[in-house]
Image (spheres, helix red, strand yellow):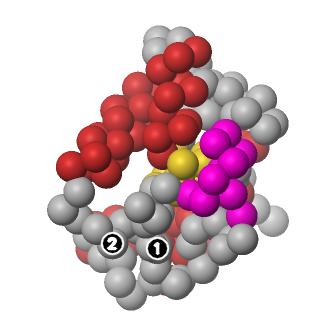
Amino acid sequence: MDVEHHSSGEGPATNDRCSICHENFQLPCQANCSHWFCANCIIQVWQYSSPLQPCKCPLCRRPINLLLPTDVVDNNNYEQDSLLGDIQKYNRLFGEQSNASIAERLRDLPFLLRRLFRDFANPNVSFPLVIRARIFVTVVVNRVGLEIISRNVGGDFEPLFL
């Protein structure tokens, strides 16, 4: 069963195939390194390698600490629900690694920001008002810089971006 995804630019290219099974994607998932895999394929790679540590991308060998599935159309599929549960478990175990280096986190930043702003701009994705406000404030503070705050507070803050 091929899983359709919304036509909002998300998902792998239509002629692309999973690099693990070499078939059309079944529930495509994007890793933090931006490579795409079938959910079942990448979960099997993880379970067969070492379930106690994150698996490495079969293409670039970077540790995968985040798997993002595409929007799913078929909501009444037990196998698909099970795979989505496995992906959530994987992300819970390895998504917020406190031992990940700053360099690894910075390397993942463009990927995460692209996904965040794509979802933020998508009217079909509803973020709670609190999250929207936090994102807006973060962007404004980083854009304007903290010198405005430092003048009002009297502290010595450096702007994040010049």
Circle 2 SS class: loop
Circle 1 SS class: loop
Q: Which of 115 and 46 lies nearest the eye of the viewer? A: 46
Residue for point 28% across, 46% down: 79
Q: Is residue 60 magenta?
A: no
Q: Is residue 42 left or right of residue 90?
A: right
Query: From the image, which quarter does the N terminus lie in?
Result: bottom left
Q: Which of 147 and 31 lies nearest the eye of the viewer? A: 31
Q: Is residue 23 magenta?
A: yes
Quadrant of the rendered image containing residue 144: bottom right
Q: Position of residue 157 (x, y in %)?
A: 65, 51
Residue for point 21% across, 49% down: 78
Residue sitting at the far bottom: 123
Proximity of marks 1 and 2: CB atoms separated by less than 8 Å: yes
Residue 128 seen from this side: yes
Residue that mark 1 sits on:
5
Q: Position of residue 160 (x, y in %)?
A: 70, 56
| Amino acid identity at mark 1 | His
Quadrant of the rendered image containing residue 115: bottom right
Residue for point 23% across, 57% down: 77
Residue for point 52% across, 84% down: 7
- From the image, give the main secondary structure of the stretch colored magenta: loop
Q: Which of 113 and 93 lies nearest the eye of the viewer? A: 93
What is the crowding at mark 2: few (fewer than 14 residues within 10 Å), some, or many (at least 20)?
A: few
Residue that mark 2 sits on:
73
Query: From the image, which quarter does the C terminus lie in?
Result: bottom right
Q: Position of residue 61 (x, y in %)?
A: 77, 29
Q: Is residue 88 left or right of residue 50?
A: left
Magenta stretch in the rendered image: 16-25
Residue 83 versus residue 142 in the image, above or below? above
Residue 96 seen from this side: no
Residue 42 versus residue 134 in the image, above or below? above
